[in-house]
Amino acid sequence: MHNLGILLSGRGSNFIAIADSINAGRVANARIAVVISNKADAPGIANATQRGLNALVIPSKGKKREEHDREVVAALKQHNVHLICLAGYMRLLSPWFVQQFPRRILNIHPSLLPAFPGLEAQEQAFAYGVKVSGCTVHFVDEELDHGAIIMQKTVSVLDTDDERTLAARILEQEHIAYAEAINAVLGGEFEIAGRRYRRKTV
Ligand code: GRF
């Protein structure tokens, strides 16, 4: 059984999708050991509490990045977390944090990286006029929205779309992609050559 740690800052729909996927058996051999928010008022952390999960608020406000990261890492280690899933966690991890969990931190981003990293990726893509966008699940390294890509799903941009409808269709794909990527990584049958993540053929 693998222990997952979820870090979030807001709505938490990706966390909910992961939790539901575990309950439905779409993610095998995993349990959510702890959910941590840096914001006390994040709806995602309220949901984690309602579900009876270990839900912690570790406020980041007024703390230096690494000072906050040390508290978060201590909590993750205390709960024997094997894989960390960033799910709308609005903090850049310090290099020290990333080094504590090599190839054990995942993030989901609402664009086809390397296009449109950073905030409001769906709005950036829409305004740029792309015809295809989507989402990316990737390992976290020391740069923003940058590590090796595990999985991408595409979404067509329709003439009738606005930023909101596009973001909503991307979000549906995020929820599917994150569970699939967690399953793949926990399965352990992969290799990373340079930036290229590949499933190993057996
Ligand atoms: C998602 O769009 C995710 O890709 C991005 O932040 C958003 C979080 O949404 N990293 P939610 O809190 O999971 O609903």
Image (cartoon, rainbow, N blue to C red):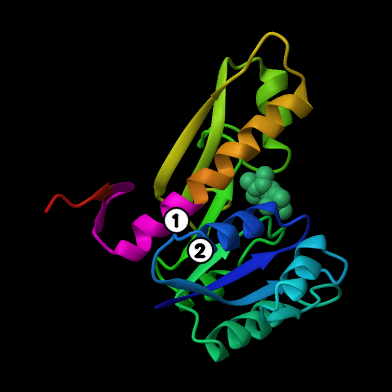
Q: Are marks 1 and 2 in contact (CB under 8 Å)?
A: yes
Give the magenta range.
Answer: 179-197
Residue 111 or residue 51, whichever sits in front: 51
Regarding residue 37, the answer to whether it shows in the image is: no
**Considering only vertical position in the picture, is 96 above or below 44?**
below
In the rendered image, residue 153, in percent from the top left (x then y), is placed at: 48, 34
Q: Secondary structure at mark 1?
A: loop
Quadrant, the C terminus: bottom left
- Residue 185 is covered by the magenta coloring: yes
Residue bearing mark 2: 22
Which residue: 77% across, 19% down? 162
Q: Residue at x 82, y 68 (%)?
A: 39
Q: Position of residue 165 (x, y in %)?
A: 74, 25
Q: Is residue 36 above or below residue 174?
A: below
The amino acid at mark 2 is Ile
Q: Residue type at mark 1: give it.
A: Arg
Most foreground residue, 189 or 109: 189
Q: Residue at x 43, y 50 (%)?
A: 180
